[in-house]
Amino acid sequence: MVPIWFASFIVFALSIILSSFFGFKALIAVVIIYLVLLLKPFKSIRIALILVFVVGTFYYNLTTVDPPENLAPIENATLTGKVDTHPIINEDRTIFFINTNHDSPYLQRFRVVCYFPTEVGKGDTVKLKADLNSPNPPTNPGNFDYPRFLKHENVFYIAAVEKPSDIVVIQNNSGYQEIVHNFRTESQEFIKDILPEQQSSVMLGMLLGMRHELPAEQYEDFQKTGIVHIFAVSGLHIGFILLISIWITSLFNLAPGLRVFITIAVMFFYCSVVGWPISVTRAFIMGSIGLIAYYSKSDNSLLNAWGLAGILIMVMDIYSIFKISFQLSFLATFGLIYIFPLIRQAINKDSKIIDLLLVPLCAQIAVLPLVAYYFNLFTPIALLSNIFISYLTGATVILGFLGIVIAPLFQTMASIFVYPAGLCIEIILYMVDVFKGIPNAFSRVSSPSVLAVLLYYVGLLVIARGLIRSNKKVLASGLLVISLFIGSFYIPPSVQNKGVLEVVFIDVGQGDSILIKSPGGKFIIVDGGGSHFSDVASYTVLPYLYDRGVSELFMAINTHPHIDHLKGLESVVSTVPVEYIGLPKKLVDVEEYNFIKETAKTNRISVVPLTRGMVLNIEEDFNIKVLHPGLEDFINSEYNNQSVVLHLKYKGFSMLLTGDIEREAIEVLLRQEQLPSVIATQVPHHGSNTSAVAEFYETINPVYGVISVGENNRFNHPGQATLDVLEQKNINVYRTDKNGAIKFKIDGNTLEIETFITNMEKNAINY
């Protein structure tokens, strides 16, 4: 018989997922579910599960709110609300959520961003003045879906607080909230005082979930070695807290009921200190159920506890099923409580070593496709790294927890526990360095489709069925599905669309970044965007490359050393292996190129100086010709007019990439170069009025023009004069601020244009 809470959880989750797509129409699925439930294992609980599905459907549709398509911004809004999360405080900003009592469902919860550090605590009531804006949707494949993330937090507006005088705490947290806040703050200060900076940042991340304390590069190393979950404050942590509480209470020979009560109370307090993330909430519920069942000698089905925890969390937070933390936590636990026993029973050999190997293996197997889907990572090294590091993490958490509990009373004694925890962290950091240096320790993979992910889990269930029934054929078929899924990670993206040239204008805001995939599968990036105010590469360009599974570049070209073209490219060549870097020959020695040349030297990348007349023969039928600048052009001139201009040619298709050239450089091109007719051109300098040269467009006679430009930019690009010229010449214009990423796909005879927004518009023409 199927455990009822386990089955109820699956059906309840299904009702929420279907309702999110179909609303009340999801009730139609009751017929299909009823037919499935006619199978023998479900007969005794069929009616109950049908009822669960109906209740879940009504619960979702009656408790959720969808925002209108365009929420109007609100300036200088005054909000009063209670801080609902532990604030993330950095050098230049503070981020937290607040709940208000507003009547409008769109104004009841906000993500607050203060552009300065400020001391507020969870539970404080604050009054603030802020500009309210709805989040921008992603404009490139692979980019973070901010509106979706906030919707799942019941947030529709971001409240931007500009100066410290615009926020005031009108009532501090009190009672239990005050105790938790003070303990968390004092623990943070104690750890920072005792341990060196690197160790303390890791300790705070592991013990209190303060991942923002970690440097970005270090956090990425933990991702690559498959152990980033140690910063999630998950069931692993709660398990260690539970064990140490049980052990300490057993020393005092307390009654079983009192031991259970104290242990649950300790877990509850720790969960409050870390902020009750989903993984901790799940572990707390399952741990509490397990303790009560054990000491009351009741039946304790781990699958039922797992299912009950899932239902309770979804009732408390209807959107939880859509959150990465929920999915990873519950699937990893499923791997441990369901897959592990099946494999262990099949091996049928008593060995602690086998157990040590199987525990991380089963957890990794269960979450593998989600890690690939959300993070574009496949980390086979995780099977090895988790064996060692998970247990070191346990020692760190236990010692650190004892330290922060004792510290308020006896700091000297507390340091006796924290120093060894620091040593454990030092060993972990050393092992991370070793593991990440192992060849093929991790791979960047393209995001698998939802269908592929579902098929993987079907394969996993088939394997489970084969193990239960000792059926080798069923087992082999499941293993085949899993093997095909993993094998797909090793199919390079270069083999996709063989014979097709792709040119993608990535939306990097006010800047340029263009990815070229040659017909033979070589990837070339031209510029990488950049900004003084945000890390464009980390948030836009690299996620797009990872989403496509691009793990190496044939060439990286910078048209000129302005920040909106160069800064992002510096990050790209520092992160992704590159064979060649192309720089304008005239400018190759300018100071702005020092970093990228040093990177090239360190990573043994060949630097190719580009000048007019050079032809880069990438492959047969595909070449890139440099049209500008020549060595004698614009000596000591501003960088824009010294931008590299490239002519891409593949069979009958051609395109110009123009960088930031302005009228003066355009006129030089018209005088000195026999400009070709092209199918498409990049409109120079983000469409500024300096590119409004009618003769240029008459000469190259493009069908399409692409303007790479930021939405509502301070330069007022594109200029109206340029737009007028493009309209007069009947040039079809695509803009990254309107269309998002713009992809040209050319097979030698046909051109297809895809845009990421505007409903993934597609146009195809023969040329």
Image (cartoon, rainbow, N blue to C red):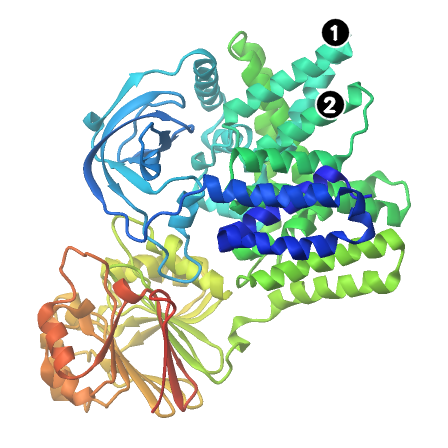
The circle drawn on residue 252 is 1
Res 67 label: none
Q: Are marks 2 and 1 in contact (CB under 8 Å)?
A: no
Instruction: Indicate the position of residue 595 as horizontal and vertical percent values.
Output: 33, 57
Locate residue 379, reporting x and y percent: 61, 54
Amino acid residing under circle 2: Leu
Q: Which residue is mark 2?
A: 291
Residue 380 visible, this angle: no
Which picture quadrant has residue 636? bottom left
Q: Is residue 161 above or below residue 136?
A: above
* Tally of marks: 2
Q: Residues within 10 Å of mark 1 (few under 14, many from 20)?
A: few
Residue 304 position in % (x across, y down): 73, 36
- Element marked by disc 1: loop
Q: From mark 2 to mark 1, how far is it between C-alphas? A: 18 Å
Task: Locate residue 550 relative to residue 644 in the image: left or right.
Answer: right
Residue closest to the eye, 319 or 649: 319
Indicate the amino acid at tag 1.
Phe
Q: Position of residue 188 (x, y in %)?
A: 46, 22
